[in-house]
Amino acid sequence: MAESNANPRYARQRRLPFWDSTAQTNLASSHALIVGVGALGCPCADLLVRAGVGKLTIVDRDLVDVTNLHRQTLYTDDDAERHRPKAIAAGERLRAVNPQVEVHPVVADFNSFDAEHLMLHERLGKPDILIDGCDNFETRYILNDLSVKHAIPYVYGGAIGTKGMATVFLPPEGACLRCLFPEPPAPGSQPTCETAGVFAPVSSIIASYQASEAIKILMGHRDRAMRSLLEFDLWEGQRRRIDLSGSRDPQCPCCGEGRFEFLDRDDEGTVSICGKNAIQVNPQARQRVDLASLQRALSMHGTFEHLGVLVKGCLRDEPYGLSVFHDGRAIIEGTDDPAIARSVYSRYIGS
Ligand SMILES: [Zn+2]
């Protein structure tokens, strides 16, 4: 580890007065998990890898789309044209940025069924920090449950329109996400990146705050982590800081009563994909799919390609596109109706 302290790659950050001799070593021994490599996850992963985090696991269920490119800074036009899985494209880019970092891309849905297993993956080891790059509230509450249950810091962030917010939860100290917001908002009650759009600089500024908090904690300066919720509106040029020091709720179902309701919840089967006319369908039971056989079977109904970790193509007689992953998960494009997506799934892939 003395090696990372002599490494010229990190020379300019070592000039910082607080970047003491153990900071780089601590960072190089740490493992960060980012869930979602979209508008927040891309800049955050880039900053962590450049700073010299030891190990980075990135989990994402989605494919790169041309509508992502204005804000999701790790992807290129070619990634979008080829609809590459985000985790794979991001992993490749991050390894090119800093080959000294161990980057583990995982193409998967971080849902109640798989999240804990993915987080505690024996080969990767338990992460030292959880970073929110999600586009949905369900996953954030799963991350909060994991954070409290395993006492792992959780760096929260969100950006929509021209506004964003960020904070960090440090269980067992202080509040958790559910102390502040006991339940996720009702489906359809909040703007999404599809309905409200995203001003790209706001996602980058929130991601920078997230990376900053993560680096402080991983380098051994947990005492410097912010104990407040920051809100920005970049269009209005406004910034607000809400002190969270007294906001722990002793009756909080999660950190107060130890109930992990989002983690223990049965998988609902379908999830709409933010920013797309698409629905993700989860299989009833997890098992590995033989993608080569599936590609041959689907080719009787349309044009389908086997692209490594998925089979992707369009149906001939119905206006839907299908991307099927090796864990049986599928993204059905061309509908925002879960019932139609489930029906397409069962007719062409099985239940
Ligand atoms: Zn709580």
Image: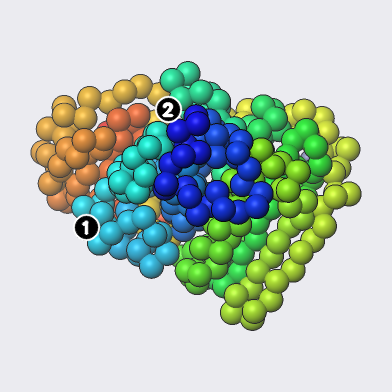
Q: Which residue is mark 1?
A: 78
Q: In this orientation, which residue lies closer to the viewer: 130 or 297?
A: 130
Q: Amino acid at mark 1?
A: Asp
Check the image and name the residue furthest to the top.
Answer: 122
Q: Secondary structure at mark 1?
A: helix
Give me the residue at 15% from left, 50% from top.
Answer: 316
- 199 relative to 283, above or below: below
- Give 340 or 119, whichever is nearer the viewer: 119
Camera-side residue of 288 and 129: 129
- Position of 120 compared to 337: left or right? right
**At 79% across and 61% down in the image, what residue appears?**
242
Residue 9: x and y in percent read 42, 48
Q: To which residue does mark 2 refer?
A: 284
In the image, taking residue 159 as reference, residue 341 lies left or right, namely: left
Quarter of the rendering containing residue 220:
top right
Q: Is residue 26 visible?
A: yes
Q: Residues within 10 Å of mark 2 (few under 14, many from 20)?
A: few
Q: Earlier in the sequence, mark 1 or mark 2?
A: 1
Indicate whether 336 appears above or below 67. Answer: above
